[in-house]
Amino acid sequence: MSQQGSAGNVIAAIASFFFPGLGQLVQGRIMAALLFCIITIVGYAMWWLIVPAIIGGIVHLWSIIDAAKFKAD
């Protein structure tokens, strides 16, 4: 997973699509994985308040994009 657009980033983005933060975990970024997972799950769990659910959806989409665009140094 050395560069953006590599097969590893595609796999990570697909993993994040199914479970937020899983793509970051596949890439070895534990703190990012935990943050994306917790914020998204809490947002989705509070769906009846509407605003947290929208925030959860935005963070879920952000986790997918972040996994796809990650560049290892």
Image (tube, rainbow, N blue to C red):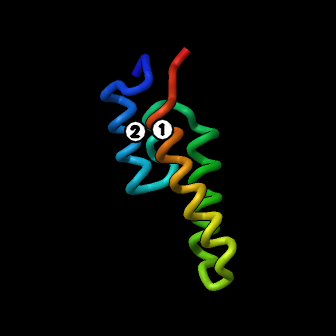
Number of numbered markers? 2
Residue 4: x and y in percent read 43, 24
9 versus 63 height, above or below: above
Which quadrant of the figure contains the C terminus? top right
Q: Hey, what amino acid is under mark 2?
A: Ala
Which image quadrant for residue 31?
top right
Residue 38: x and y in percent read 62, 57
Residue 46: x and y in percent read 64, 77
**Disc 2 designates what residue?**
12
* Residue found 59% across the figure and 75% down from its top: 45
In-image side of 61 versus 12 (left or right) = right
Mark 2: secondary structure? helix
Q: Residue furthest bottom?
A: 48
**Disc 1 designates what residue?**
67
Which image quadrant for residue 19?
bottom left
**1 and 2 marks in contact (CB < 8 Å):** yes
Which image quadrant for residue 18?
bottom left
Question: Callout 2 environment at 10 Å: few (<14), some (14 to 19), or many (20+)?
Answer: many
* Residue found 58% across the figure and 37% down from its top: 30
Q: Nearer the viewer, residue 22 or 67?
A: 67
Question: Callout 1 environment at 10 Å: few (<14), some (14 to 19), or many (20+)?
Answer: many
